[in-house]
Image: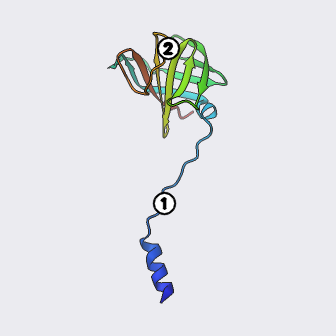
Amino acid sequence: MFTVLLAGALLGAPVPKAIHKFPPDPERMLGEWEIIVNEANGQPRAETQPTIWTFTDGNMNSSSGNTNWKIKLDPTQTPKHIDIGSYLGVYDFDGEKLTVVYSLDGQRPVEVKSGPINYMSVLVKTKK
């Protein structure tokens, strides 16, 4: 009788969701990322061609303008901090997406969302 009750309880028990373990942020960011959303001052920016950001150890290269910046991450802050050259920003991962928000005015954004004086890029890792 106990076995039947136990089996019934287990069959009706919710199945725990799988927990996906991601590597630390500096390692997770490595590679090529394509911008899928690009906004300036809260408005969409027209893109004439796909833009790829490539992160290597301590550097980021953008295919638009073929520019290269030193980057610095501080994932211990809330929101997480990213410095792209002299631009101060914040970032967050949402599953397989990376959102980066930065400002050109020397002030670090306080949220990872589009705003009146911020640039926001949402990226997905390329399949290379």
Q: Which of 28 and 2 is in front in this view?
A: 2
**Residue 115, quarter of the rendered image:** top left
Q: In this view, does 96 lie above or below 20?
A: above
Circle number at residue 16: 1
Q: For the residue marked with disc 1, what is the amino acid?
A: Pro
Provide the secondary structure element on which disc 1 rests.
Answer: loop
Q: In this view, does 126 lie above or below 54?
A: below
Provide the secondary structure element on which disc 2 rests.
Answer: loop
Q: For the residue marked with disc 2, what is the amino acid?
A: Ser
Q: Which of 27 and 92 is in front in this view?
A: 92
Name the residue rendered at 58%, 31% in the picture. 75
Name the residue rendered at 60%, 29% in the picture. 31
Name the residue rendered at 38%, 23% in the picture. 114
Mark 2 residue crowding within 10 angstroms, few (<14) / some (14–19) / many (20+)? few
Task: Please state the horizontal and vertical placement of residue 34, each as a whole percent of the image.
Answer: 49, 26
Q: In this image, 81 relative to 47: left or right? A: right
Of callouts 1 and 2, which one flags the residue occurring earlier in the amino acid sequence? 1
* Total residue callouts: 2
Task: Please state the horizontal and vertical placement of residue 89, each as a whole percent of the image.
Answer: 50, 20
Task: Please state the horizontal and vertical placement of residue 126, each as a whole percent of the image.
Answer: 52, 32
The residue beneath circle 2 is 64
**Residue 27, quarter of the rendered image:** top right
Mark 1 residue crowding within 10 angstroms, few (<14) / some (14–19) / many (20+)? few
Task: Please state the horizontal and vertical placement of residue 9, each as a whole percent of the image.
Answer: 45, 76
Q: What's the CA distance linking mark 1 and mark 2?
A: 43 Å
Q: Is residue 85 above or below residue 73?
A: above
